[in-house]
Image (cartoon, rainbow, N blue to C red):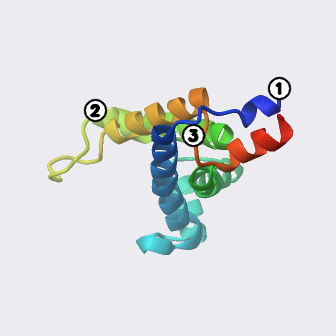
């Protein structure tokens, strides 16, 4: 059962999907956790998530950690299925709590208040692919599986 978490299809396209999703979520997590890339940092992000969205502090912290550490895990391909589930859940919650009311499309031209959920659907689809097929050819999951599973 535990070994199944590390099994993966040796597909290079899977590797590209995983790393791309990982970079995006690592960057978003770094904005929230560390204040990198123009982000607000942990204290302000926690305040915003609690005050504006009503998220309890432990759940807000869990969401930030899932983005940052999940993104990092996806980049290197370690525990990718778990990281992808976390990211998928975050995106579903974001649609439910914030973006669902704004329709499908992002607000590219700033003509209305808020962005839609098209980005979130794409992230969910990529995360689902990783959950089903694994980390791909170049991943620590593949290495672990080859050592433990052999």
Side (left or right) of 144 relative to 96: right
- Residue wearing tag 1: 1
Which one is earlier in the sequence, the residue at label 2 or at label 3? 2
- Residue wearing tag 2: 103
Is residue 96 in sight in this rendering? Answer: no
Residue at 58% over, 42% down: 137
Which of the two discs, 1 and 2, sits closer to the camera?
1
The crowd level at tag 1 (other Cα within 10 Å; few <14, some 14-19, many 20+) is few
Which one is earlier in the sequence, the residue at label 1 or at label 3? 1
Q: Position of residue 51 (x, y in %)?
A: 54, 55
Which of the two discs, 2 and 3, sits closer to the camera?
3
Q: Position of residue 47 (x, y in %)?
A: 57, 62
Q: Which secondary structure, mark 1?
A: loop
Residue at 35% over, 37% down: 117
Q: Position of residue 4 (x, y in %)?
A: 75, 29
The image's mark for residue 68 is none
Which image quadrant is residue 81 in? top right
Looking at the image, residue 23 lies above or below residue 93: below
Closest to the observer, 109 or 120: 120
Cα separation, mark 1 vs mark 2, equals 39 Å
Which quarter shows the C terminus?
Answer: top right
Contact? badges 1 and 3 (CB < 8 Å): no
- Residue wearing tag 3: 136
Contact? badges 2 and 3 (CB < 8 Å): no
Looking at the image, residue 21 lies above or below residue 7: below
Looking at the image, residue 54 lies above or below residue 89: below
Cα separation, mark 1 vs mark 3, equals 19 Å
Cα separation, mark 2 vs mark 3, equals 33 Å
Which quarter shows the N terminus?
Answer: top right
Which of the two discs, 1 and 3, sits closer to the camera?
3
Closest to the observer, 111 or 54: 111
Side (left or right) of 101 relative to 135: left
């Amino acid at each position: 059962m535990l070994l199944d978490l590390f099994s993966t299809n040796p597909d290079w396209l899977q590797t590209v999907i995983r790393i791309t999703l990982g970079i995006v979520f690592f960057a978003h997590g770094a904005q929230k956790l560390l204040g990198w890339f123009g982000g607000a940092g942990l204290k302000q992000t926690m305040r915003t998530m609690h005050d504006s969205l009503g998220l309890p502090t432990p759940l807000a912290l869990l969401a930030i950690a899932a983005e940052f550490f999940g993104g990092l895990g996806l980049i290197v391909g370690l525990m990718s299925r778990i990281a992808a589930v976390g990211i998928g859940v975050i995106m579903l919650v974001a649609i439910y709590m914030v973006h669902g009311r704004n329709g499908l499309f992002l607000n590219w031209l700033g003509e209305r208040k808020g962005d839609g959920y098209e980005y979130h659907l794409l992230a969910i689809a990529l995360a689902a692919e990783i959950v089903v097929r694994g980390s791909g050819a170049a991943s620590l999951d593949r290495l672990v599986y080859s050592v433990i599973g052999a």
